[in-house]
Amino acid sequence: MDEDKGTCNHIDYADEQGLEDGYDAKTAEPAQDPHDPKNWPLLTKITTYMTICCFTFLANVNSSNFTVAIKAIVAEFHVSSTDAGHLVSLNVFFFGLGNLAWVPLMRVFGKRPVYLAALLGLSMMNVWSAKATGYSELLGARIMSGLAAAAADATVPAVVGDMVRPEGRGHWLMIFHLALTSGLFVGPLINAYIVQDAGWRWMCWFLAIASGVVWVVGIFTIRETTYLPSRHKASQDKSHNSVWSVLSLKQGYNPDASFLRTVKAILSAAAYPQLLWCAFTIGVSVGWNIVVQLTASRTFTSAPYTWPAGDIGLLSLAGFIGSLLAFYVGGRLIDQISTRYTQRRGGDRQPEYRLPALVVPGVVGPGGILIFGLCIAHQTHWMGVAVGYAMQAFGVAAISNVAVTYALDCYQRVSCVLFLPLPPNHRTSAFRPMLL
């Protein structure tokens, strides 16, 4: 899209001149600089991105794992099911708010050190959860694990913006959303059998071990995607691409960036109409997804169903199937639609060319919620519930990706800052189940 027609210059967050380390968004085109992440070899992009998406998967497993352990928590700590549900709701709430710290830190220190620190934190907080001796201690550990997991959420679209040109972003972002929804739907399946066969503490140990493994892998695979043109122009060091340089935690450090200015930019971004629409759209879809998950857990562990925890996890496979079916509709298809509109209208790519892709998931998703609710209310066969679950998951995966890709096209130069208002909106929707 033409940067003069876009909205990416509405926010000034780098310095008094409104430039990001010498980058003028109005006139600059992606340089053929090999240090620019857009010009990296495909393998480098894939290893960086897939490691971050593994973090996203684990972060969302972390946010949903106690949905299948409500009964076990009630029995061990003698609390109500509502209190047990707070282990999910408060974790997810702080999952959203955590980016108020992570995003400004990324603006100053770069993405690589933040991802590595957050992964290590997620592992340590799950060790604490596994060793908790009381409900209050466990709740505190769950809140802290939500804060650590937050780095894998709002920041990822910015990584896509760093590495991928507009015509391919929908597909790449759908991989992120597939990792996210896989955590929400496959996570309960994994955790359900762990709870059933080994107890709820071992699902925390599983996350601690898995996060630790991804952290070790990430040391070698997560590259710094923050691109500072003036620094690369000034540096002619031939060892820039040496192993030690790649592993450095200083590649993304920007002395011109400011933590407080970034926080101010975040607050300003919350008033942007495109982001308000995006936040509302994702908030509604993700909020209802959490309602569906907790409702399914409470309903099918009680009479007349009385399912064991493992069977509750199997029900979440319906959601995973729905998100898989959305992979093309919410990803590659929106790139194809945008490209076709661009070609028809003179080659000027506009963000709104992606929005027609909302029609199908906008009908299927709400329809699935309706089917799910009616089947639960009338205590029908579980198959009807599973169909509604899958339809709802299809909607949340496709709708979220279309909305985020649209927002990234609108504000690509400041994406890491601008996506932060989204997670607090859709993550705080987690408080809806507390009212059930």
Image (cartoon, rainbow, N blue to C red):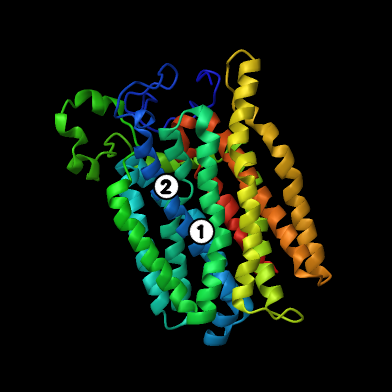
Residue 61 drawn above or below residue 5:
below
Q: Which mark is residue 299?
A: none
User: What is the x, y in percent for residue 253?
Assistant: 27, 39
Residue 29 drawn above or below residue 161:
above
The residue at 29%/34% (across/down) is: 256
Q: Nearer the viewer, residue 77 or 181?
A: 181
User: For residue 354, which quarter of the picture?
Assistant: top right
Q: How many marks?
A: 2
Residue 274 in view here: yes
Q: Residue furthest left?
A: 238
Amino acid under disc 2: Met
- Looking at the image, tell me whether mark 1 or mark 2 is earlier in sequence order: 2
Q: Residue furthest top?
A: 346
Q: Which mark is residue 60?
A: 1
Residue 249 drawn above or below residue 301:
above
Element type where label 2 sits in the image: helix
Element type where label 1 sits in the image: helix
Q: Nearer the viewer, residue 185 or 250?
A: 185
Residue 256 drawn above or below residue 318:
above
User: What is the x, y in percent for residue 1?
Assistant: 54, 21
The residue at 56%/59% (across/down) is: 184
* Quadrant (top left/top right/bottom left/bottom right) for the C terminus: bottom right
Neighbour class for label 2 at 10 Å: few (<14), some, many (≥20)?
some
User: For residue 388, which quarter of the picture?
Assistant: bottom right
Q: Residue furthest right?
A: 378
Amino acid under disc 1: Asn
Q: CA distance from mark 1 to mark 2?
A: 15 Å
Determine which residue is flagged by label 2.
50
Tell me whether circle 1 and circle 2 mark residues in contact (CB < 8 Å). Answer: no
The residue at 56%/76% (across/down) is: 69
